[in-house]
Image (cartoon, rainbow, N blue to C red):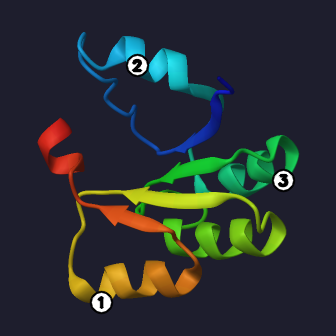
Amino acid sequence: MNKISVLLADDHTLVSPGPQGAPLCRRRLQVVAEAEDGRQAVALAKKMSPQVVVMDIAMPMMNGRDATRQIIKNCPETKVVVLSSYSDDACVKELLQAGATGFSDEANRLL
C-alpha cells in the first residue's frame, strides 16, 4: 500500500493522533515536510509535490487562503485540506473558492 504524502502547514504544532490513531496514520500517511508560515508552505509544496496539504488559516508571512490559492495554481494535483479553529461561513467560502478540497473546524477539539 502506497502512503499518502502530506505537508503540514501550521504555525503551531499540530496535535498528533492518540495511541489508537497513530498506527493507522503511520501506515497510511507520510509527512514529507512541515511549514511554519504560508510562504514556506508554498515553497515546500512546489519542492515536494505532496498529495495533500493540511493547512491552517492564520499564519505569518502569508495566510492560509493565499497559500492555498498559490499551491493549487502551482501544484494542481495537490489537495489542500484546511484544519482550523475558524469556522465562519465567509471564511469557509473563501477557502473553498481559493481551491481547498475540504475544511474542518475540528482543531478546537484537538487543543
Residue 71 shown left or right of residue 18 in the figure: right
Which of discs 2 and 1 lies nearer the camera? The answer is 2
Which residue carries the number 3 mark?
A: 46
Residue at mark 3 to residue at mark 2: CA–CA distance: 27 Å
The amino acid type, in three-letter code, at marker 3 is: Lys
Q: Earlier in the sequence, mark 2 or mark 1?
A: 2
> Which residue sits at x=50%, y=68%?
101
Q: Earlier in the sequence, mark 3 or mark 2?
A: 2
Which residue carries the number 2 mark?
A: 24
| Label 1 secondary element | helix
Residue 14 shown left or right of residue 87 in the figure: right
Which of discs 3 and 2 lies nearer the camera? The answer is 2
Q: Quadrant of the N terminus?
A: top right
| Label 3 secondary element | helix
| Label 2 secondary element | helix
The amino acid type, in three-letter code, at marker 2 is: Leu
Q: Is residue 111 above or below residue 97?
A: above
**Labelled disc at residue 35:** none
User: Could you tell me residue 81's position as x and y percent?
Assistant: 47, 58
Q: Quadrant of the C terminus?
A: top left
Which residue carries the number 1 mark?
A: 90
Residue 8 occupies which quadrant of the picture?
A: top right
The amino acid type, in three-letter code, at marker 1 is: Ala
- Residue 35 visible somewhere in the drawing: no
- Residue 79 visible somewhere in the drawing: yes
